[in-house]
Amino acid sequence: MTTTEETAPPRTEPHDPMDDPEIAARVAEYLELPYTISLVYDTSGGPPAWVVWVEELPGCISQGDTAEEATEMIREAMELWIGGHIEEGWEVPPPKDRFTEHSGKFQVRLPVGLHGKLAAVAGDEGVSLNQLVTAILAEGVGWRPAGERKRKRSRT
């Protein structure tokens, strides 16, 4: 007589590709890249929730009760999505190059007094007017160069 224990397939714990140090290191590199993350508040078909997904990673989606929770959850979803693809030998798409049509240069007209004030501040700071205006604009839109994002994360 056989028992259920003898005929049942062995139970296995869920496998996490992040347990492999090599995969985890590669995933960490991908997570530093500027993927496009979309976040919307969804009230259609079920309890309202914040839904978040990575545009370049098909099926990499998560949700949360708050925007903050959804944002935290998508990072975990990205780790699993990317780790699974690396483990299986599948391609991990790179981030979109969203700004290929922009040269990095533009002209702006501003009042003479503002131009003078910016030039004075740049002189006081010991930077060029271009560097000062770039820093002010970047701060205004919450943009940081990729290298600064990486350094900031590694400190915490």
Image: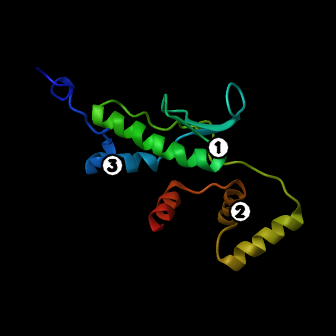
- What type is the residue that disc 3 sits on? Ala
Say which residue label 1 marks: 65
Secondary structure under the numbered disc 2 in the rendered image: helix
Q: In the rendered view, does 109 fall on the left or right side of 136?
A: right
Measuring 36% from the left and 31% from the top, which residue is drawn there? Answer: 91
**Looking at the picture, does residue 140 appear above or below residue 38?**
below
Q: Residue 131: where, in percent of width, then height? A: 65, 64
Q: Residue 45: where, in percent of width, then height? A: 68, 24
Residue farthest to the top, as pictured: 1
10 Å neighbourhood of mark 3: few (<14), some, or many (≥20)?
some
Say which residue label 2 marks: 136
Q: Quadrant of residue 154?
A: bottom left
Lower sequence index among marks 3 and 2: 3
Measuring 32% from the left and 37% from the top, which residue is drawn there? Answer: 86
Measuring 68% from the left and 33% from the top, which residue is drawn there? Answer: 47
Secondary structure under the numbered disc 3 in the rendered image: helix
Secondary structure under the numbered disc 1 in the rendered image: loop
Q: Residue 14: where, in percent of width, then height? A: 32, 38
Question: Which quadrant of the rendered structure holds the N terminus?
Answer: top left
Q: Nearer the viewer, mark 1 or mark 2?
A: 1
Q: Nearer the viewer, mark 1 or mark 3?
A: 1
